[in-house]
Amino acid sequence: MHINKMNIPNIKINEKYTNGKNAEDLYSIFGKEYLEQIQRVISDVTGLAFVTIDYKGQPLTEMTNFSKRCKYIRQTPMHKKICELSDASGAIRAAVSKKTSIYFCPFKLLEVAIPIIINDKYLGAFIGGQAICSDPPEKILRMQDQLLLEEIDFSKLDFFDEDADAKKYTYREFESTVKLVELIISELVKREAISSYHEKENKSKIKALEEKLAQVEEKNLELKKKISSINNTVNLLFLNNMMESISNLALIEEAEITSKYSEHFRKFVMNFIDVESNSANFIYKTLIEYFKMKEIQYRDRLKYEISIEDDVRETKMPFKALITYVIIMSYLGLNFNEDDYEIKVHLKKDSEYFIAIIEDNGLGISEDSFERFKSTHIVSTEIEDINKYLRQMEEDSLNIFSGDLQIKIEENSKNTKIFMKYRLNS
């Protein structure tokens, strides 16, 4: 008595496709959900019951298309143990021989164990069948004899009702179906192994390209910074020389006011374009030059106050947004308001926050204020651009510094107040 062995070819896959895989785990090839999906589809198409086991004989999936006869038999604890012993024996024989094995279970149902072998490595098996076959060859193994179950009288089991809807095959049909399942499994294993390899390779290549791109961008940024630094140095020298020349010419021509204005303008411009200096005291001195310049231009119409507390002078501020607010607020208040313009700037420290407060009696600086302004004034393209720039600056500042920066604008008919808070320990 012996097992009928079908000459299923060992699944050969180029070693590079299986490199890095766990050769003892079918999940590494298919994944649990896909493995169960494959089993379910094969079972539905063939009408055979199937379960997938690993190389240890442990089931990896739930049994699908269980026959009524098997359900009936396994209601008896002793019969259930016999069924499990038969399944285990069929799987072991397939694993040892590394060949597909067709056999009769002790309850006279035709079954099959299809091993999954990749590059001579046994990974597990598809166990299935539960079919009724009326013309099997004599050589087909009977597990009833193999497991020495002569003391059990199987003739007393009546399967007529349970077999009414059972899948019935001739042996040739069953054999052909098994060959089809072998082919499907073989092709799926190859496809999944190669697909997984390419997916891994592509991810590796993408990661390498991303790292290379990041390096290029970093070098490009460094180059831009160097170029920008050189340009800033050249611009500083040029502007400083130009402003000094204008101031000197004004003195020669005895234009004292123009000379003072030029000198304040020179200092303001030099400070404003200096990207390295960012202390609160530096910003304070920059604003002083701006107000002195505007004081010359508008005389008594401009009234300003600017103060800074001593303990905040050396505080580093990673932005100059408040200078932009002061310039735009002053521009609108002095050019589009006939009354005297008043503006106050106070820089201080409160616990872990640097706080800047800007307050004026101008036209307002919020989106709503700009809309009201447009309804009563002829608005140039430059004014529109100021509004867009201000909104973009606020958005960028809040995004860059996230929760470390807060900007709050309070407005009424006579007053605008801006609070800027920056967390010092960020």
Image: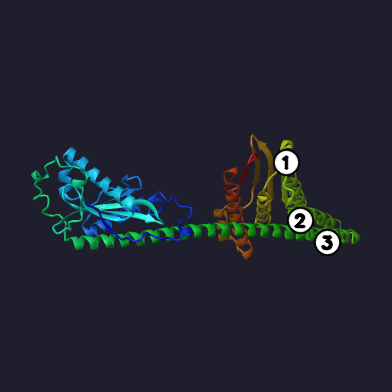
Q: Quick one: quadrant of the C terminus?
A: top right
Asked if the residue under mark 2 is in contact with the one under mark 3, i.e. CB atoms within 8 Å, the reply is no
Asked which secondary structure carries label 2, the reply is helix
Amino acid on which disc 2 is placed: Val
Residue furthest to the right in view is 252
Asked if the residue under mark 2 is in contact with the one under mark 1, i.e. CB atoms within 8 Å, the reply is no
Asked which secondary structure carries label 3, the reply is helix
Amino acid on which disc 1 is placed: Ser
Residue that numbered label 3 is attached to: 242
Residue that numbered label 2 is attached to: 269
Disc 3: CA contacts within 10 A as few (<14), some (14-19) or many (>=20): some
Residue that numbered label 1 is attached to: 307
Q: Position of residue 9 (x, y in %)?
A: 35, 61
Cα separation, mark 3 vs mark 1, equals 31 Å
Camera-nearest residue between 368 and 128:
128
Q: Quadrant of residue 250?
A: bottom right
Earlier sequence position, callout 3 versus callout 2? 3
Q: Position of residue 46 (x, y in %)?
A: 23, 59
Amino acid on which disc 3 is placed: Met
Disc 1: CA contacts within 10 A as few (<14), some (14-19) or many (>=20): few
